[in-house]
Amino acid sequence: MRRYLIRRALLSALSLLAATIMVFSLAHAKEDPVNMFFKADSYGMTQEQLEYQKKKLGLDRPLIVQYALWVSRIVRGDLGKSLEGNRPVTEIVMQKAGATIQLALTAWMFGIVIGIPLGILSAVKRETIWDYAGRGIALFGQALPAFWVGIVSILVFSVMLGLLPTSTKGEGEPFFTQIRPFILPTFVLGWGPAAVYLRVTRSAMLDVLDSEYITLARAKGVASRKVIWKHAFRNAIIQPITVAALVLAGFLDGAVLVENVFAWPGLGRRSVQAVSQNDFPVLTGIVFIFTAVYLVVNLIVDAMHALMDPRIRYHERD
């Protein structure tokens, strides 16, 4: 298993290096980022001032040198400074990360609590009304886009019924005193993953329930509840856990659509603002954080998978 984890760690490191190259290339693909933000003869800037900004940001050097300097700053924990406001990007990320983490965790738990039990019920009660209902929920959950569900939810529950606020989680306000603003974003963000958990859990449970050792346990007269929870569920849970961890990584990266629909003050919304403002240091910094978080969580999932699935350990011995 050690060799397996070392290989996965090296692959993650190479993926992160490739991501830095891609992010840097895309930031410089169209034109000089400073020219996109500081237009000559606008904001009262002269060409000399424009050249000064390029020199200040190190954009007057060759691209390979700019890339090397950018990576060296990242290694030191310096993501640069925003073009608008001259604020450190690390400070902006830390300020916005809290709202994204709060929303991600609540939506993640909502998806698990709804999806996995319904998947188990659908598998155990196959070809019954419970199974058909579960498959229907999974179908609609994966078919309906999150932004559409968000807009309709705001229209129904906020505009027509007036039951819930449309958006605006207050920045800096305590989490547990702000329950109502979380309800709609959590539902919209967790609805799709709940459908994924349902389908994955149902499929894994059906595979296990049709296996020979489950048939043998039932033939020996083992109680149905014990068969389902002790024998079937313990062996079927590996796939849902793997999917759930990767979904959490995606949530932590910032649910861009949901955060913008609900004006949620997180990293996803801030990245869209950086695009509209042509603020490339903020954009590249946030995208790098997104990529690093996803790769780290993916590596942790691989380690969990190796610990939970003995087949990986047997393969390593062979």
Image (tube, rainbow, N blue to C red):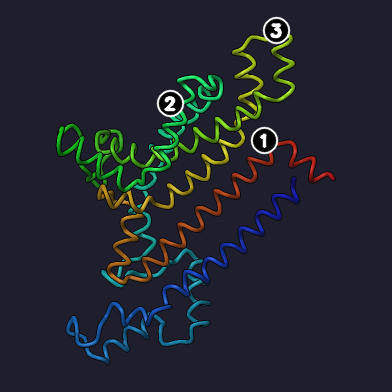
In the rendered structure, which disc, 1 or 2, sits on the residue that comes first in sequence?
Answer: 2
Q: Secondary structure at mark 2?
A: helix
Q: Secondary structure at mark 1?
A: helix
Q: Quadrant of residue 231?
A: top right
Residue extending farthest to the bottom is: 48
The residue that disc 1 covers is 308
Residue extending farthest to the right is: 318
Q: Quadrant of residue 133?
A: top left
Q: Nearer the viewer, residue 239 or 209?
A: 209
- Residue, x 45% and y 87% (percent of image)? 61
- Residue, x 28% and y 38% (percent of image)? 184
- Residue, x 46% and y 49% (percent of image)? 250
Which of the numbered marks, if any, corresponds to residue 133? 2
The residue that disc 3 covers is 221
Give the crowd class for mark 2: few <14, some 14-19, many >=20 residues within 10 Å.
few
Q: Which mark lies nearer to you, 1 or 3?
A: 3
In the rendered structure, which disc, 1 or 3, sits on the residue that comes first in sequence?
Answer: 3
